[in-house]
């Protein structure tokens, strides 16, 4: 019955308000989310959106006011200890004791989880994250990338079914970012569900199957990455027209709109080329002086969604 669940994370109507003397901050407001088993799921949102609060609820560091949360099919209130064993959380900050070696650090962590010596997989995990040669080096001698991988290793000590990564590549250079991405994909391929928070839209685009955009403690968009990218394949073109025109029927599919002397249309760059539109204008003898095009990216869509929420 171990894998008898569809969602690695399921949250229903979760609320969390932080109270400090006179000030109250609503961090999560009727928050709902479903993270499918086996997926890589991205949580996106501006600072203060509520991402860390949600992760901290999953990790048992923050207590929700109400609502239901289950991890791998286990309700966190009814099965608080068991559900904690199902996830590993990789924190953002690199607070590794500099005088521990990777081997010692993982052994210590295994001890905290009460894993018996013979059941520990310290060397196997260190090999998997590419730190076996550094197993006896002090953490302070490790490079930034190695430290990140050590944090991942630490979160994998108890063989969790799900790994949660908080900004896994924040402040990391481009090459290292790519190698961490590949590493995250490998962990996922081996059967571990992944949830990550990120500021980098490129990271979400590269890794995630599904993306949830959060703002003000609420979900403002939750869709597959591919559907979100479809929104991005829309291009806008503006033709500065010379006189008032009658719009030909052939242009109707591009949602034409005339404003301030410009004919504005949108089209899907995957199915239409700008040349096709220009050919129609030429055929209909519609004269124009200037052409401007705009392409939206995930950033635009993100900003639009956040601003309108
Ligand atoms: P994110 O991780 O998306 O940046 P957070 O979950 O950290 O967002 O924060 C959500 C809101 O809750 C913010 O307004 C933040 O200031 C507030 N908040 C988070 N943790 C605490 C806390 N321990 N005490 C008071 N307010 C908090």
Image (tube, rainbow, N blue to C red):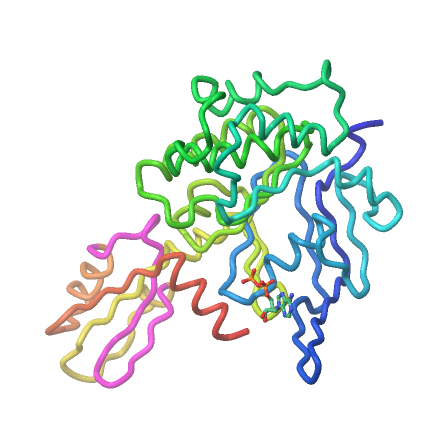
- Residue 160, horizontal then vertical, whole percent: 68, 32
- Residue 105, horizontal then vertical, whole percent: 58, 30
In which quadrant of the rendered view does residue 6 lie?
top right
Q: Residue at x 45, y 24 (%)?
A: 137
Q: Residue furthest left?
A: 289
Q: Residue at x 75, y 35 (%)?
A: 85
Residue 28 relative to residue 289: left or right = right
Q: Residue at x 53, y 36 (%)?
A: 151
- Residue 111, horizontal then vertical, whole percent: 71, 29
In which quadrant of the rendered view does residue 248 lie?
bottom left
Location of residue 107 with respect to 24 vertically, above or below: above
Which residue is more in the foreground, 162 or 309?
Answer: 162
The residue segment tinted magenta is 254-275
Location of residue 253 with respect to 275 vertically, above or below: below
Which residue is more in the foreground, 186 or 92?
Answer: 92
Which residue is more in the foreground, 129 or 297?
Answer: 129
Check residue 182 for magenta coloring: no
Which residue is more in the foreground, 250 or 43?
Answer: 43
Check residue 270 for magenta coloring: yes
Q: Residue furthest right?
A: 78
């Amino acid at each position: 019955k171990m894998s008898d669940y569809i969602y690695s994370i399921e949250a229903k109507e979760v609320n969390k308000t932080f109270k400090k003397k006179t000030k109250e901050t609503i961090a999560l407001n009727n928050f709902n989310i479903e993270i499918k088993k086996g997926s890589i799921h991205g949580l996106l949102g501006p600072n203060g959106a509520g991402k860390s609060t949600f992760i901290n609820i999953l990790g048992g560091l923050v207590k929700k006011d109400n609502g239901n949360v289950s991890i791998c099919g286990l309700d966190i209130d009814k099965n608080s200890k068991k559900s904690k064993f199902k996830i590993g959380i990789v924190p953002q900050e690199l607070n590794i004791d500099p005088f521990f070696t990777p081997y010692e650090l993982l052994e210590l962590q295994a001890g905290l989880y009460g894993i018996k010596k013979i059941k520990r997989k310290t060397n196997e995990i260190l090999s998997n994250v590419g730190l076996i040669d550094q197993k006896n080096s002090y953490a302070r001698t490790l490079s930034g990338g190695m430290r990140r991988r050590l944090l991942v290793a630490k979160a994998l000590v108890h063989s969790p079914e799900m790994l949660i990564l908080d900004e896994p590549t924040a402040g990391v250079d481009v090459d290292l970012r790519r190698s961490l991405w590949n590493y995250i994909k490998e962990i996922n391929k081996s059967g571990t569900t992944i949830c990550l928070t990120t500021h980098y839209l490129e990271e979400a685009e590269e890794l995630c199957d599904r993306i949830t955009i959060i703002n003000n403690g609420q979900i403002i968009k939750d869709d597959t990455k591919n559907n979100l990218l479809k929104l991005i394949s829309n291009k806008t073109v503006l033709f500065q027209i010379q006189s008032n025109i009658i719009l030909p029927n052939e242009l109707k599919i591009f949602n034409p709109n005339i404003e301030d002397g410009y004919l504005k249309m949108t089209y899907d760059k995957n199915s239409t080329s700008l040349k096709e539109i220009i050919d129609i204008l030429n055929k209909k003898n519609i004269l124009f002086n200037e052409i401007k095009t705009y392409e939206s990216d995930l950033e635009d869509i993100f900003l639009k969604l956040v601003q309108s929420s």
